[in-house]
Image (cartoon, grey):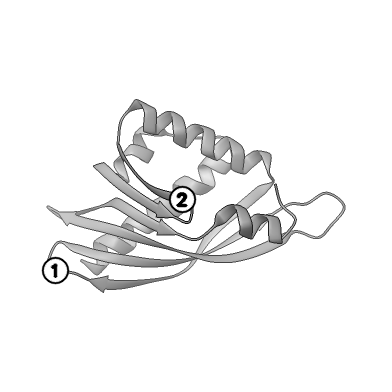
Amino acid sequence: MEHEVQNLFERYARFFGQSLAGEMDMDEAAALYASDFIAASPAGVTSGKNDHRFRQAMEQGYAHYRAIGTKEMRIRHVRLSPIDDCHCVAHVAWTAIYARKDQDAARIDFDVHYLVQVLDGEAKVFGWVSGDEQALLKQHGIG
């Protein structure tokens, strides 16, 4: 399971970089996620389907990241908490780099906890839990 999950997040980070460069491959994005998912943050809990609405939301989300000056998103570390033979929580430590007007670039470290399912040798995200992204960006003068 560890190899499949590491591969998933290598693909995820690569996709994020391409998206920040304006080169989004929505088929690749969809392949990272299960057919249905849940998300939780201080803003609430939502659920959704990996469909055209999700793809549109992802396109808008990456456009927003570019608009606020996100230049790079890199993974510092991935730690797994296995649940059973097919499921785990992947604790992913990210570093985001943001360009800011008339200031040095901001470097922000944060964690996201992904629910991952591995079936037939392929890992997919079916959920995630994150902190208050908007508060963290505001704290660093971004957005």
- Residue visible at 12% across and 67% down in the picture: 85
Q: Residue furthest top?
A: 52
Count residues near mark 2 (Cα–Cα under 10 Å), then give few for <14, some for 14-19, many for 20+: few
- Residue visible at 36% across and 55% down in the picture: 128
Residue 11: x %, y % from top left:
38, 52
Count residues near mark 1 (Cα–Cα under 10 Å), then give few for <14, some for 14-19, many for 20+: few
Q: Does residue 78 appear to the left or right of 76 in the view shown?
A: left
**Nearest to viewer (mark 2 / mark 1):** 1
> Residue 1, which numbered label?
none
Foreground: 59 or 36? 36
The quadrant of the picture occupied by the N terminus is: bottom left
Question: Amino acid under label 1?
Answer: Asp
* Pointer 2 residue: 14
Question: Amino acid under label 2?
Answer: Arg
Q: Does residue 142 appear to the left or right of 122 in the view shown?
A: right
Q: Is residue 49 positioned above or below 69 on the image?
A: above
Q: Is residue 102 visible?
A: yes
* Pointer 1 residue: 84
